[in-house]
Image (spheres, grey):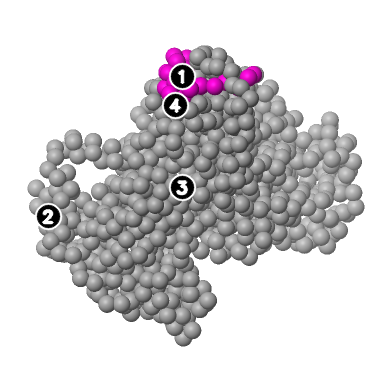
């Protein structure tokens, strides 16, 4: 068992038996390989089912807005930043959430594993940086480092910036990472080509809104796509409406997105949605020097006006 | 209608010969996943199932139902008109028996004693389905628990079985026979082939790992199941994202929207999901299913209790396992039904 | 194949603003194609989808009675985008009607019985259809005593006042029109509908109660009916739910296994007891 699993169970049981929180929100084993499920532990017995491995992809901060309970949340670097964002945006009170930070070295991408293997995987076991997958008539061992999610490979905030308790020691942050190499490439292309690129990216979209529902930032009571008086955009798979939806959602997340990848993980047709949000994240960093969720003291730049805000686009 | 044999290496030619009379579709590998796409001879045989169900062929994600002119000066302004129905004959090769059974269930839903959904049936009647039996079911399949199976024939026009070097083609309907006659180049199957099929069927059914009992669900009353206390726990981690409903072959709920662009107007129907809070929302603001738990409960009650009650026992789930594979928070229908049946 | 989603084109013949807050308007519609009127043969209790091209459809109870020929008549509350667009339309405008839909009041099984009609607010629309139909010379003899109890918040919110005035003058129907609280200029009954029902004290033996109103009225009417001796299968209700197709296919209006648009909207209390309260 991963050492962190033991520590997490110990912390959870302690918090529950001390009545410090009503529920510990973590991960439990999934019923299919390479998948974990959110686990709401309300008793020490339930807490004993908590686990930690390379499949803890779901951003648990998604469950926080509008909760009335006192919650302990297991949070990777990105998740913790989203919790900070929730506090800053008044979606939960700081003293209502107990952040159990877990320094993270990356979560795996089941699509990558699937594509490497090609055949149907019926079992996947991790051990010491290796992943052994097996199915009818085959068994292969891969290196976890080779099948990490793209956002994990370029992650520069592996340690939670804010936490109440840390599971284990902080891990070294990655340096010399060019997070936006492919974005810069894209920005170098002429407008028409860029537009075609994004249109092509979402050609399979079925307007299921899983991306929105998995995203911790999307907590609006009435999402802009649900409004009907006035109705902002059509609900069909008309390519213009589809692109409008994704672009507008990215703009609503601009300055708040932590690149946790929940959107891409939830998408049933595998759209590389982070291309939208990362492009804006880069803009925000360059213009305002801001990264979301790093501190409880700062607000997302698009919610704040400063007289010295960059405005070279006003001609 | 006799069983026929096709040499596997002649499958490409078989499909090519049909593409003269039918728009032909089959499983293909695209962008790292299996999709049903137009085929021109080459088709995938070694796959489990497509990520999205093939219901899109008869129930497209978005479909223009009616059109109208929004030009106030036009003589027939704002009068709804039917659109010409495209009655292109289509052939779908490689549909799995679970998806075909789903079509059979949806046939009962899109037609009731008073009304027939012409959009569904126009396309259904113009399509011929050649299904491919599952020699190797997925780990998430539980079709045999819900009135289906890896070699099930309901909803298909022809059942194809991969015998190794040959493919057995079993015509099930007149439409199926017509397609086999149109293709030609087939030999009659012999007793050995039939015995092979029986053996493969037995092995496939035995290989289904997930068994889910549904007998008590059938016996219990609606209110007893509805008021059970496990629903809140099931719904706790649900995101109400609707992925389950979108990948599901039997989910059929839709929304109707009017869209006007300049002077041209359309009445469109789009896939909709009971997972959405908007689904039951009244204009007054009253919502009969105001919370996540009521919506999650609705989905499972609909599939496993309401549909069987209304459709003579047919369960509204065919055990394809797509929702299990795709749910971002791993809500497993097999576990939920076990709770309902406990 | 007949297309059940295609509405009949109709012209708005007359618009009447029914209530003092102007939120309720009645629309008298005339079929553009005469054969459509014949096809639209309906029974009191049924509804139709009013179709506004470019906006959508809304399911509205038919307020006219089949005994009134040449037109159909709906009273619509301004609530959302479609009803607001409808309220902005003028006499002579073209729109669509799809129907008749739904299962109608069980008028045949109500024959030979006393009828107690309890209506609140603007839910009285299909009950206007029912009462008009029952009072028609061809139909009146089929039924015993008819009680009609109807209430609104204020006199200005009562629908069909002139017609109901005429009903009050008849002796083949006992009419009780009430308003919630005292109001200057009103010398009729004052009191909530459930209280007036109790005062009216209709006999329950061999009677059917037809109840249509806002959820709060229904909640308080039910105990009164029980007190008067009405069994659950003697009480008939008409439900509302969000609808789209109106023909029992799209799944939106489901209450348990039933489709409100097709198996309903009329259900007995006994039937509703076995169903989830998702309406």
Residue named by callout 1: B14
| Residue B5 x %, y % | 54, 22
The reply to the same-chain question for discs 1 and 3 is no
Residue stretch rendered in magenta on the structure: B1-23
Query: Given contact means CB atoms under 8 Å apart, are the residues at marks 2 and 1 in contact?
Result: no
Residue named by callout 2: A311
Q: Residues within 10 Å of mark 4 (few under 14, many from 20)?
A: many
- Whether residue B276 is situated above or below residue B75 in the rendered picture: below
Q: What residue lies at 59% left-to-right and 25% top-to-bottom?
A: B170
Residue B319, by quadrant, is: top right
Residue A136's label in the rendered image is 3
Q: What residue lies at 57% left-to-right and 16% top-to-bottom?
A: B178
Q: What residue lies at 12% left-to-right and 43% top-to-bottom?
A: A188
Residue named by callout 4: B25
**Lateral position of residue B25 relative to residue C177, left or right:** left
Q: Residues within 10 Å of mark 2 (few under 14, many from 20)?
A: few
How far, Cα to Cα, is label 2 from label 3? 59 Å
The reply to the same-chain question for discs 4 and 1 is yes
Q: In the rendered structure, does residue B20 fall within the stretch colored magenta?
A: yes
């Amino acid at each position: 068992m991963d050492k962190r699993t033991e520590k997490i169970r110990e912390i959870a049981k302690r918090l529950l038996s001390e009545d410090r929180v009503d529920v510990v929100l973590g991960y439990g084993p999934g019923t299919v390989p390479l998948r974990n499920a959110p686990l709401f532990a309300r008793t020490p017995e339930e807490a004993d089912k908590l686990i930690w491995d390379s499949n803890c992809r779901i951003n648990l901060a998604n469950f926080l807005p509008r909760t009335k309970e006192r919650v302990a949340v297991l949070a990777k670097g990105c998740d913790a930043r989203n919790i900070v964002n929730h506090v800053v945006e008044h979606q939960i009170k700081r003293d209502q959430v107990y952040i159990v930070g877990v320094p993270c070295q990356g979560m795996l991408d089941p699509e990558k594993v699937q594509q490497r293997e090609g055949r149907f995987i019926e079992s996947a076991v991790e051990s010491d940086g290796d992943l052994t997958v097996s199915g009818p008539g085959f068994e292969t061992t891969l290196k976890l480092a080779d099948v990490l999610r793209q956002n994990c490979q370029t992650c520069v905030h592996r340690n939670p910036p804010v936490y109440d308790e840390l599971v284990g020691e902080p891990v070294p942050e990655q340096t010399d990472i060019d997070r936006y190499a492919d974005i810069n490439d894209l920005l170098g292309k002429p407008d028409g080509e860029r537009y075609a690129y994004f249109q092509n990216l979402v050609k399979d979209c079925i307007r299921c809104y899983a991306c929105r529902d998995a995203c911790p930032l999307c907590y609006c009571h009435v999402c802009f796509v649900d409004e009907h008086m006035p109705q902002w955009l059509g609900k069909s798979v008309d390519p213009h409406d589809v692109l409008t939806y994704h672009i507008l959602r990215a703009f609503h997340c601009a300055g708040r997105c932590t690149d946790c990848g929940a959107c891409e993980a939830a998408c049933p047709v595998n759209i590389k949605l982070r291309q939208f949000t990362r492009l804006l994240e880069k803009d925000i960093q360059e213009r305002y020097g801001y990264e979301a969720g790093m501190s409880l003291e700062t607000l997302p730049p698009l919610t704040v006006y400063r007289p010295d805000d960059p405005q070279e686009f006003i001609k | 209608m006799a069983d026929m044999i096709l040499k596997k290496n002649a499958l490409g030619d078989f499909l090519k010969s049909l593409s003269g009379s039918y728009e032909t579709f089959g499983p293909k590998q695209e962008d790292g996943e299996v999709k049903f796409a137009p085929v021109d001879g080459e088709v995938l045989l070694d796959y489990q199932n497509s990520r999205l169900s093939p219901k899109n062929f008869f129930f497209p994600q978005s479909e223009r139902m009616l059109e109208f002119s929004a030009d106030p000066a036009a003589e027939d302004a704002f009068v709804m008109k039917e659109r010409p129905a495209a009655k292109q004959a289509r052939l779908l090769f490689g549909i799995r028996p679970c998806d075909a059974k789903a079509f059979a269930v949806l046939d009962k839903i899109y037609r009731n004693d008073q009304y027939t959904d012409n959009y569904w049936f126009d396309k259904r009647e113009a399509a011929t389905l050649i299904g491919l039996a599952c020699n190797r079911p997925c780990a998430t399949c539980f079709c045999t628990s819900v009135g289906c199976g890896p070699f099930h024939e309901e909803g298909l026009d022809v059942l194809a079985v991969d015998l190794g070097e040959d493919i057995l083609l079993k015509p099930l309907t007149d439409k199926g026979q017509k397609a086999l006659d149109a293709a030609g180049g087939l030999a009659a199957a012999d007793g050995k082939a039939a015995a092979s099929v029986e053996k493969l069927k037995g092995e496939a059914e035995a290989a289904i790992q997930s068994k889910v009992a549904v007998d008590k669900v059938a016996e219990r009353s609606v209110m007893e199941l509805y008021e059970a206390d496990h629903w809140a726990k099931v719904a706790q981690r649900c995101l109400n994202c609707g992925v389950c409903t979108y990948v599901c072959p039997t989910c059929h709920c839709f929304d109707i929207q009017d869209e006007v662009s300049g002077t041209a107007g359309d009445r469109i129907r789009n896939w909709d999901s009971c997972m959405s809070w908007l689904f039951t929302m009244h204009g007054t603001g009253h919502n009969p299913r105001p919370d996540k738990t009521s919506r999650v409960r609705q989905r499972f009650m609909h599939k496993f209790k309401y549909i069987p009650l209304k459709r003579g026992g047919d369960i509204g789930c065919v055990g394809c396992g797509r929702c299990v594979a795709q749910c971002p928070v791993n809500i497993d229908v097999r576990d939920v039904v076990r709770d309902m049946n406990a | 194949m007949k297309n059940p989603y295609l509405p009949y084109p109709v012209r708005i013949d007359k618009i009447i603003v029914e209530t003092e807050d102007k939120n309720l308007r009645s629309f008298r519609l005339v079929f553009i194609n005469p054969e459509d009127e014949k096809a639209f043969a309906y029974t009191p209790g049924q509804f139709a989808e009013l179709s506004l091209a470019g906006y959508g459809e809304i399911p509205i109870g038919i307020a006219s009675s089949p005994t009134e020929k040449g037109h159909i008549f709906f009273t619509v509350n301004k609530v959302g985008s479609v009803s607001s667009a409808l309220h902005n339309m003028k006499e002579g405008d073209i729109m669509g009607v799809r129907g008749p839909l739904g299962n109608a009041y069980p008028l045949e099984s109500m024959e030979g019985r006393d009828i107690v009609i309890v209506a609140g607010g603007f839910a009285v629309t299909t009950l206007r259809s029912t009462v008009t139909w029952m009072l028609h010379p061809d139909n009146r003899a089929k039924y015993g005593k008819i009680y009609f109890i109807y209430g609104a918040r204020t006199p200005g919110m009562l629908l069909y006042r002139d017609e109901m005035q005429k009903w009050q003058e008849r002796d083949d129907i006992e009419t009780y029109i009430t308003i919630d609280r005292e109001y200057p200029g009103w010398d009729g009954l004052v009191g909530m509908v459930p209280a007036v029902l109790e005062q009216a004290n209709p006999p329950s033996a061999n009677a059917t109660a037809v109840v249509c109103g806002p959820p709060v009225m229904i909640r308080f009417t039910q105990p009164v009916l029980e007190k008067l001796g009405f069994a659950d299968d003697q009480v008939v209700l008409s439900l509302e739910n969000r609808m789209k197709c109106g023909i029992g296919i799209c799944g939106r209006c489901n209450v348990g296994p039933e489709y409100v648009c097709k198996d309903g909207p009329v259900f007995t209390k006994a039937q509703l007891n076995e169903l989830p309260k998702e309406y």
